[in-house]
Amino acid sequence: MIPFSIQAPWLNNAVARQTVRLLSAVGLSGFMVWLTNLQEPGWAIITSVIVTQNSITDTISKGRDQIVGTLIGAVASIVPITLMMFLRWPLWEAFAIAFIPLAVLVSWKPEARMGVVTLMIATLFPSEGDPYLRPIERVLAILIGVGVSTLVTYVVLHEQARRDAFRNAAETVTQIVAMLQKARSGDTDWVTIQDMNDECAASLRKVQAALEEARREHWKPLEQRDPMLAQLPKEVRQLQMDALVVARAMLRFPHSGATIPAQQVATISAGLLRGFQWVIQRCNDEATARSGDDSRVAAEVISALPAEDETADPIIRFVVGILLTDLKHIISFLGEDDADRP
C-alpha cells in the first residue's frame, strides 16, 4: 500500500484522516479474510474497526489488548469444550468452570476482557466442524484484524504527527503572546494569567503527544531524521516558562512604585511581538511542508529584537533578558534548514 502524502486541506481534519484509515482497514481486512477463507470472517473486520485508532500508539495498545485477551480466551475455551465432548458435562456447568476465573482476571486486568468474549464465542455459539477449530479461527481472525489495522495506521496518512506538532506549537506560541499582552494591559489578575498559562500547557501537551506519535512512525530515531521536531517541545516549553515569569513581573510592576516611559514599553513590546509572530509563521509553514528557511532571514529577525538594556528597571530588564535569550534561540533554531543538518 502506498502512503498518502498528497497535500490537501482535508488532511488537517482529524475526522477525515481517521475515516480514510478506517475504510482502508475494513477493506483490507475483508480482502484478507476472503483469501484465507475463514469460517467466521466478520470477526477480523470487527477487530479492524475496534483496533484502528487515530494514533499509532493507541492502535498498538488496542491491538495488544485484543491479541492477549483472545489468546487467553482461546486457551480457556479448551476446558469447557473438552468437558462437554468427552465427559458429557452440561453446557452451562462447563462454561462456568472457565468463565469464573476469567471474570476474576478481567476484574483485575480490564484489558483482558476480550478473553471473556472469545470464551463465549467458542463455547456458547455453535458452529459446524471441529469445536477445537473455533478458538483457533477466532485467534486467526483477531491476528488478521490487528495486523491490518497496525499496517494501515503506519502507512495511511502516517506523517500527520509532524504537521500536528508544529500546528499545535504555533497555537501554543499564540497563546503565550496573548498571555503577555494581557499582563501588559494591567487589566487582569494573577489567577487569570495562571488560567491562560494552563491553556498554553494543554496545547504544549498536544505538541508532546504528536512528538511521541512521530517517534513511532519510522524505525529510524527521530533525533536523526527530524532534529527540528525532536527539539520543538523543549524550545516552546522554555518560552512558556519565560513568558509566565515576565507576566508575573508585569503584574507587580505598577505596585512597585517604578515607572518606565511609555515609548520604551511600546518599543520592547513591538520588537518581541515581531519575533513571536515570526516563530508562529515558521511553525505554520512547517505544518504545511518540511522546507526549512534561510538562516539569514532568522538573523534579520533576531537583529530586529529589542536590546536587553532598553529599560532601567532591574527586574523587568532581567526577566525580559531571559525571554529574549530563549526567543533568539528558538528563532535561530527554526531558521535553519534541518534537512541539511549533520
Image (spheres, grey):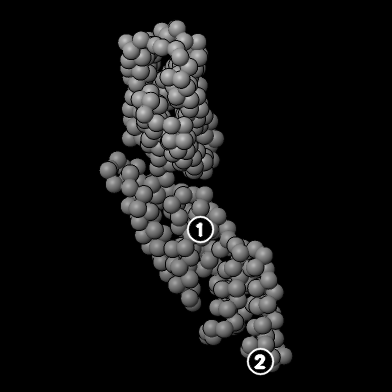
- Marks 1 and 2 sit apart, C-alpha to C-alpha, by 37 Å
Q: Of 219 and 65, which appears nearest the observer?
A: 65
Q: Is residue 244 left or right of residue 69?
A: left
Looking at the image, is mark 1 or mark 2 earlier in the sequence?
Answer: 2
Residue 35, given in percent of the width and then of the height, sits at: 44, 67
Q: Can you tell which mark lies on residue 90?
A: 2
Q: Secondary structure at mark 2?
A: loop
Q: Residue furthest left?
A: 9
Type of the residue with mark 1: Gly
Instruction: Work out whether residue 211 can be spotted.
Output: no
Count of residue discs: 2
Residue that mark 1 sits on: 147
Q: Residue at x 45, y 14 (%)?
A: 257
Q: Secondary structure at mark 1?
A: helix
Q: Residue at x 42, y 23 (%)?
A: 334
Relative vertical location of residue 41 with respect to residue 224 in this rendering, above or below:
below
- Give the class, few, some or many, for how many residues have Cα within 10 Å of label 1's Cα (few <14, many ≥20): some
Quarter residue 28 falls in: bottom left
Residue 16, given in percent of the width and then of the height, sits at: 32, 52
Q: Of 290 and 197, which appears nearest the observer?
A: 197
Q: Residue furthest right?
A: 87
Q: Residue at x 70, y 74 (%)?
A: 101
Type of the residue with mark 2: Pro
Marks 1 and 2 in Cβ contact (< 8 Å): no
